[in-house]
Amino acid sequence: MSDHKDDLGKHPRGTLAVVGLYGLLFLVGWLAVFFFIYLPRGAVTR
Amino acid sequence: MMHNRQLATANVGVAVGAFGVATFLAFMQALSRAALDLPWRSPKMYYLSVTGHGVLMALVFTTFFIMGLGVALTTRALGRPLRYPRLAWLAFWVATVGSLGALWAIFWGKATVLYTFYPPLEAHPVFYIGLTLLVVGSWIWSAVTLGTYAAWRREHPGVPAPLAVHGILATIIVWLLATIGVAAEMLFQLIPWSLGLVETVDPLLARMLFWYFGHPLVYFWLIPAYVVWYTVLPKEAGGRLFSDPLARMVFALFIILSTPVGFHHQFMDPGISAGWKMLHTVNTAAILFPSLVTAFTVTASLEVAGRMRGATGLWDWIKRLPWGNPLVSSVILSMILFALGGIGGAVNAAFGMNSVVHNTAWIQGHFHLTVGSAVALTFMGGAYWLVPKLVGRDLELDLLARVQPFLWFVGMLLFSLANHVTGLMGMPRRVYEVGYAGNAITSHWQNLTLVSALGGVLLFVSASFFLLVMLGTVLAGRRREQPALEFAEPLAGKPERPLIFDRIWLWVVVAIVLVVIAYAYPLASHLAMERFGSPGFKPF
Ligand SMILES: [Cu+2]
């Protein structure tokens, strides 16, 4: 356990990877609803 | 040691009981939506059941669990018993009697108004009075907790409150601010109207007051769940809390941002101008931020846990987490479901796009990921961790407890995804007969309601496992001294001096200012208009 203690002070690389992937999924999901469902149905644009 | 155990046990006990009844109702509804032939399937039965499920889960289960958890966490973290124990019991009994009253009205078919009780749908007065008493009980609990904190504060000047207490205080402030709205709706509109003292009711005013309360209600549920994520999960996972100040910042942000956002539930309502809806939209986008910070901090705490267990690569810390610990698996799975819910939530919260999902099955798909998973699954995990400590017995049937979170996860994915998709197809929510007497368009979503029903069956099995574990633990668990309730240590050590986020009063003032900005003008201009009330409607 103590061998890895030094690791703890570093940036949480794994977390940044997870959060980055989630951000990507978030964008893709939201934009998919926007472009493929909302706009084709005739969005209110003004 | 933990103080006021019996009180915490009583509160958690009512919560679990409410959960059990609500679970059964949910099971019947899931089958009914799929148009499966059930005995006594009828519109009245359906609306009665949906009302019962919503009230029991969203209002009774959550409130009592939060009160029980709050008692256990604050007395342990502050190292002192509650200041006014008799008042705390009074809170429990007032809330219990109120809940029983509301349930009487529901199950006797006198309150088929759903858990949002929008007028002009009208219920028996006992329904409204009962729910008001539930809130009054929670106010007394709030006062007791604040009084206990004040006593501790006098004994410990100049030190920051323990993080768990900081979170519970944020919960209480959000709740006290929020319940002003629903109390006004009950006292000035619904109770006098249901008693026949006035003839008509203003539905839009009621909706404004309800959603003034309804969104922060979500944070009243969620902040205690976050307290578990921040202060319990890292410890149980064998690690440390990644950052204590970030957690305090999140709680402070919830105090100021929870309330001035209610119009995002009223995008389709007439009578509120677009500019004010837009302001609430911007505030809603802001409130995503503390949840994103939470996702980061809690995940980082888990990574710390994995690395302390010897992980080295980019991903293997995930495998090293103690997935067999039901608190750990419950919370992590609830976070994943919540993360998915966040994506849908950003669709709901977008002023224009909201029209695509408004009043469709998408909405119930969404909030079962938030309150039905982030909150409910965390609370179930919390119960596996807390109840043995409360009753001094080992967790019984622990194999079921280990399987249960995963079953919930799979069941909820099926249920929720099916509802998101059918919602986008146009399937309405809160409608008994979604087949429209065999209309061809509805055949597409009719098949998917079977997927949702399958999810419902898995959720029912999962919930039954939870109930069996709870019953088994309380009745048959081996009596033994349980490990003490312990909180996670922050990676960088505990803060010695208070931070700006600890200046609760400052945040209360900011919160009030934001609420006034967001609501004073729309409310005043609505009240200044010539208003026409509606008579009540009782469809059944
Ligand atoms: Cu909301």
Image: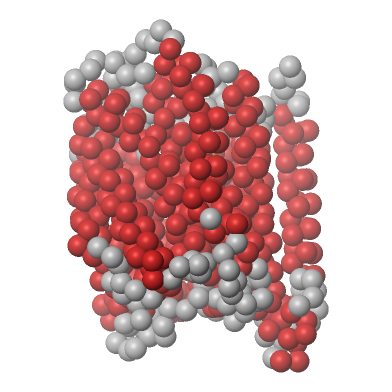
Query: Which percent across, then down, holds residue B270?
Result: 52, 17
Which residue: 27% across, 46% down?
Answer: B136
Left or right of B261 on screen, residue B224: left
- Which quarter of the picture shows residue B460? bottom left
Left or right of B39 on screen, residue A2: right
Q: On screen, A35 above or below B39?
A: above
Of B39 and B25, nearer the camera is B25
Colouring chosen for the image of the structure: secondary structure
Q: Is residue B23 visible?
A: no
Which residue: 31% across, 82% down?
Answer: B392
Query: Which percent across, then down, holds residue B110?
Result: 23, 33
Q: Is residue B532 visible?
A: yes
Of B125 and A35, nearer the camera is B125
Which residue: 21% across, 32% down?
Answer: B125
- Image quadrant containing the C terminus of chain B: top left
Query: Which percent across, then down, holds residue B45?
Result: 30, 38
Q: On screen, B106 above or below B99?
A: above
Which residue is the extreme one toward the top?
Answer: B530
Q: How many marks?
A: 0
- Image quadrant containing the N terminus of chain B: bottom left
Which residue: 33% across, 59% down?
Answer: B147
Left or right of B457 on screen, residue B55: left
Of B516 and B63, nearer the camera is B516
Query: Which percent across, then down, holds residue B472?
Result: 31, 76
Of B126 and B183, nearer the camera is B183
